[in-house]
Image (spheres, grey):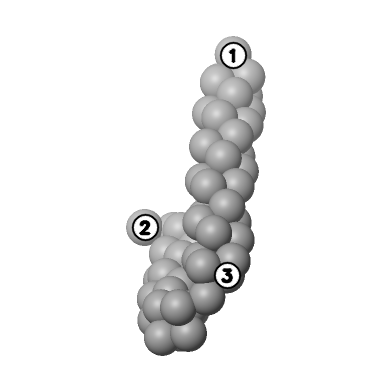
Amino acid sequence: MTKLEEQHKSQVSKLNELEVKLMGMILQTENYDLMNLFNDWQEQRNKCNILYNELLEETLNSAGK
């Protein structure tokens, strides 16, 4: 695994830890507006990740030509 991949893995792990803590806090407050907003944020993050992965794939494919 490259250094960049290790850094990315570490950052994703930290993001997951923060998400778990945030979800716990939201559930404790039972604030449905926050729950919905957090769900929207997760969906948008997933869309961004998908597009970023497609961009990386496109870049790798064009570099290999």
Q: In this view, does 37 lie to the left or right of 2?
A: right
The residue under label 2 is 1
Name which residue lies at 52% across and 37% down.
Answer: 50
Q: Where is residue 38 in the image (x, y as percent from the top left)?
A: 55, 63
Please, what is the three-letter code of the amino acid marked with disc 2?
Answer: Met
Is 29 above or below relative to 13?
below
Q: Is residue 48 left or right of residue 9?
A: right
Q: Can residue 18 be seen in this view?
A: no
The residue under label 3 is 34
Q: Position of residue 62 (x, y in %)?
A: 62, 19
Please, what is the three-letter code of the amino acid marked with disc 1?
Answer: Lys
Q: How many labels does the image show?
A: 3
- Mark 1 and mark 3 lie on one chain; the one further toward the N terminus is 3
Residue depth check, mark 1 versus mark 3: number of the one nearer the observer = 3
Say what secondary structure mark 3 lies in: helix
- Mark 1 and mark 2 lie on one chain; the one further toward the N terminus is 2
The residue under label 1 is 65
